[in-house]
Amino acid sequence: MSEQPKKKGMNKWLIIILTVVVIAAIGGTAFALLKENNPMVMYMDAQKNTIDEQTERMAEYTEDQMELADRQMKEAYKSEGTVTMDMNFQGDQVQQVFPEVAMIQGVLSTVQLNLDSKYNPETKELYGGMDLQMQGSSLANGNFYQSEDTFAAQAPFVYDKYFAFGNDQLGDVLTKYTGSSEGLEELPNFAEYAQSQMTQEEAKEMLTEYAVALGKELKQDQFTLSEGEEFEGEKYDKVTIEISEKEAKQMLVTLLEKVKEDERIQDTLEQQAALQGNVEGVQMEDLQAELDKAIENIDKVKIPGGITGEAYIKDDLVAHQTWTMNIADDTDETIKVAISNDYMKDGEDKYTSTFDVNLSPDSKDESIAVKYEEKGEEKDKGLHVDYTIGVKSDFEQDNFTADLLLNTDYTNEGSKSDFELKLGGEAFEQQAMPAISGFINTTSKEDGDNKVNQKTDFGLNLSMDDPAMGNMSADLEFNFDNNLTFTDDLEFPALEENNTVQLMDVSDEEMMQIGQEVQMNFQEHLNSIMGGFGAGF
């Protein structure tokens, strides 16, 4: 009995989320309709034109990276990369309180992490290696290898052999060495998982299927047209969409039934659960039962007044759009939901696009709002976009605002972004919060058909005025340089008796001896490092 209130709340929020999905699908629906002069066709065409114009503009700068990501799932490749970093502390009292800061900054500037990987989707093999170096000398190195049947890991700086077990022996290994498998029984094949991910095209097809299924629930008599309506001083053709409570519930049932029958979603949930070690957490029988229960209990969810949409159309584009509804459960607590989005053009080169969601309970003077805004302008060499992604809550006990501001320049070779996180409200006034800002720059250059160089620079700045320490700031920068080569000519580790310790076969005595050898090797390695860098410390 004690769990019942929680369950009701979860169901209500689930319905809110699903309803938002339904609304998004209505807006994105573009199924086959006769080109009649009616409000339904006018709205569908305008909405499709709006989505196409926005996605096509961005596709010019993201299409190559999406194709590269899809190619990495389907083709064999190897990569070699480096990660370097730098750090800079500044402040009135930093050097006095932390005299080691200068030394730490100097050490970190000489640290480099070397990474290499190999992936063969045909043989389902995956390899990953790392070598942490300072001033050109190795501090620690390790690698792992997985085939269709086996997983192995090695740390050469302390032991020269691989530790291996069968992918299906994970639970047995954990039980043997820790006493319990904690529900983990099998290690998924990561190469197989990578291949199973949907490509961008497959994801687009899936979304289209759902939009079509929901769109077929719409009827022409739900749409009405009013010409010459004024909105913020401009004249538009206004299309109003009225979806009754009964019709809205039927659309939710359609969505739930399609999810229930969609093997792609079931496979994805199973794979995610396996990767997270939650083998028993997501059983398809349980998921099917939950979906069946949600469908059976759909009448317990109330959408009084149904769903109302208003779209203001000009030049075959949806310039302004709002959706409103009230959602309640059997406790009669009502949540008001308001969704709006705008798409305004300023000539051919500038645009503003927004999407806002506002939730507020009818019984309390509270609300939570999520907003997304982008202001873009096409330049000679690319596209500049200013993003604002924010959350604002106004509760009786507390309130806060959080806005992420990004300024991004896109080109055909990559992007440069500056960001700043702004926090405000009572929730953040109780303690000193640092100002957070930074940058992310990426480039990708092809060298022939099968080689790509990728670079990512990430910087983070933290600054604050502390009453005791005065002004302080910390700058962190990470630089990633990666060379990717598509090739079938890959060499993977050969796991043989003379270079592998099979964890399920080794005895306790042998494992104890190995542990002692690892400790001895580690101490020798540590002494070597301290001796080599002693002068620097």
Image (cartoon, rainbow, N blue to C red):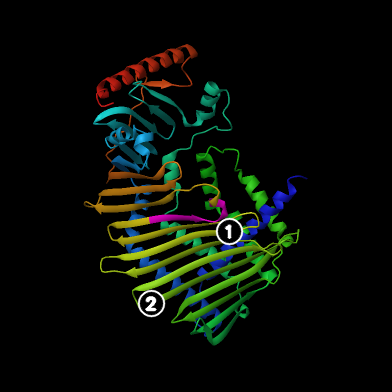
Q: Residues within 10 Å of mark 2 (few under 14, many from 20)?
A: few
Q: Quadrant of residue 325?
A: bottom right
In the image, what residue occupies the spot 50% across and 59% down?
390
Q: Which residues are magenta?
A: 419-428
Task: From the top left corner, tell me how far across and down residue 10 is, in percent.
Answer: 66, 52
Task: From the top left corner, tell me how far across and down residue 408 is, in percent.
Answer: 35, 60
Task: From the top left corner, tell me how far across and down residue 217 is, in percent.
Answer: 61, 70
Q: Which residue is mark 2?
A: 346
Q: Which mark is residue 75?
A: none
Residue 62 seen in the figure: yes
Judging from the image, what secondary structure is the residue with disc 1 in?
strand
Q: Which mark is residue 393?
A: 1
Residue type (three-letter) at the residue carrying disc 1 = Ser
Judging from the image, what secondary structure is the residue with disc 2 in?
strand
Residue 33 seen in the figure: no
In the image, what residue occupies the spot 39% across and 55% down?
419
> Across the whole image, how many numbered discs are drawn on residues?
2
Foreground disc of the pair 2, 1: 1
State whether residue 19 is above or below residue 528: below
Q: Residues within 10 Å of mark 1 (few under 14, many from 20)?
A: many
Could you tell whether 99 is left or right of 326 in the image? left
Q: Quadrant of the C terminus?
A: top left
Could you say which is closer to the camera, residue 12 or residue 472?
A: 472
Q: Quadrant of residue 469?
A: top left
Helix, strand or loop: magenta stretch: strand
Q: Are marks 2 and 1 in contact (CB under 8 Å)?
A: no
Could you tell whether 185 is left or right of 158 in the image? right
The mark that comes first in sequence, 2 or 1, is: 2
